[in-house]
Image (spheres, coloured by chain):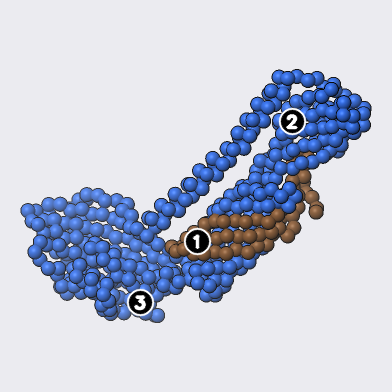
Chain colours: A blue, B brown
Amino acid sequence: MEPIERHIKQHFDNKSYSYNEAHWLDAQKLIAENKRRRRGWLIWWTGGVSLILITFLAYWTLSDTTIIVSNMDTDPIEAVEIAKLGTDQNGIVNSSHESPMENTDNISSERVGISLSSGQSFKNPSTHPNKKDQGSYSAYSIKINKREKNSAVSESSDILNQTFTNQQKPIENSANTRVEKNYAAGESESAIVLNQEKEGVEPSELKVQQNLLDESNTVVTEPVSKTEEVIALENATGQLNIVPITPVSKNANFGFGFVAGYLMQKQFTEGQWLNGAYLGGRANWALSPKWSIGTDLSLVIQEMETVHFHHDVISGYGFGRDSIVTDLYAKRAVTLQIPLAVSYAFGKHTISGMIGSRILLDAQARMEKLHYTNADPENTASGVIVSRSTVLTKKNS
Amino acid sequence: MPEGALAPFSVYSGLRYGWMIGRGWGLETTISMPLYHRNAKLDIGTKMAADQGIRFELGVMKVF
């Protein structure tokens, strides 16, 4: 015997049914409350989507922007020690040489700001088809501003440290000029940009060079080719030097991320469109420039279908079998979704074929109505189940 | 279709189209269809469909 059948028999068999108007009013009230509760998901869903969009837009806006994490006044000695990463006689930045900023006697104010920035892009062809955008970088910079006492002369130094995989990354300096440069996988660079801003004084001679790693990880020093952007940098800044640091990992075939979205599913049984949302993580592995495989692990919350089902039970009046029709309003189901995908990339587009599994973790449902009819119209009655434990009945005589 | 009292699940297949819009962000849409599903059984004894019917998904992704 099905539990629902047991449940019904317990409440209807061998009982007489009396009509109580108050019960029906209570039932209507409860049903109205339940309907209001069903609208609650819309509020949560709208709020959730809004949160995702706001997060998306915020990240979109800030992801490639230098973020000032601290901007503090420091002890002048500390600032000078940092500034010892200055220029040598040839104007080349070298930490082993004393900086002209070493003398603190005339320093009236100094400010040190630290900024961090990072950008990452995955080498997976399905996600980053444009090779010049592939790779990742992380960077920090220390900015030192100095103004001498009773002087209009100010100096600023930017110590930039950037590591790259294979990526086109603009070099930024305090004058907000940008130099686009392509970096090979594994390249790492740091740079110190010194600016001198003096009223009525032209920027000092600019010397630009870069030290890059060759295939055997040997440092090769060569001048930066003077593109228009570099010339613009020359005009705007004092000196630029690029020095290599430890290479970063070249293993960029593996990537991970997250996915979130909306879904709608049409059930075959009732033809209803059911809404839902999913959120999860994703991992990718590039097999070739075109092919990759990946998998997700997503949690899906979705509506379930309303089920109408019939039960025949023995009537308590002994008139034969009553036909019971119950509307079961399923509230929601929580499902774990695990697809395996093979992807082919063309340009910025990807087509994936997948096979996966969805495992139902939890389901909640609520019975709201129970109608039962007897073969004898005179004894037709209907009932309402507003919860699993409350049964209200009405007998039409 | 077989029914089970525990761990209802389905096996599905589908196609996904993704479009990278930059900086690791992308949009994707998926259409999928269950190939097999085992029904759920709720504690009130009602058989519930674990996963039936065609499904459309529209989402965003961010990869690193």
Q: Residue furthest left?
A: A150
Q: Nearer the viewer, residue A374 or A82?
A: A374
Q: Do the residues at pointers 2 and 3 share their chain?
A: yes
Q: Residue at x 14, y 68 (%)?
A: A203
Numbered tag placed on residue A385 in the rendering: 2
Between circles 2 and 3, the one closer to the viewer is 2
A209 left or right, relative to B23? left
Q: Residue at x 33, y 73 (%)?
A: A181
In percent of width and height, residue A210 lies at 28, 75
In percent of width and height, residue A85 lies at 22, 64
In percent of width and height, residue B53 lies at 70, 54
Judge whether residue A54 can be spotted in this image.
Answer: yes
Residue A59 quadrant:
bottom left
Between circles 1 and 3, the one closer to the viewer is 1
Q: Looking at the rendering, in which quadrant would you find the N terminus of chain A?
A: top right
Judge whether residue A278 can be spotted in this image.
Answer: no
Q: Residue at x 80, y 53 (%)?
A: B2
- Residue A125 sits above or below residue A379 on the image: below
User: Chain for mark 1?
Assistant: B
Numbered tag placed on residue B26 in the rendering: 1
Numbered tag placed on residue A213 in the rendering: 3
Q: Residues within 10 Å of mark 3 (few under 14, many from 20)?
A: many
Mark 1 and mark 3: span between their CA atoms? 33 Å
CB within 8 Å, label 1 to label 3: no
Mark 2 and mark 1: span between their CA atoms? 47 Å
Q: Residue at x 16, y 60 (%)?
A: A155
- Residue A151 sits above or below residue A98 on the image: above
Q: Nearer the viewer, residue A29 or A9?
A: A29
In percent of width and height, residue A235 lies at 19, 70
Q: Secondary structure at mark 1?
A: strand
Name which residue type carries label 1.
Answer: Gly
User: Chain for mark 3?
Assistant: A
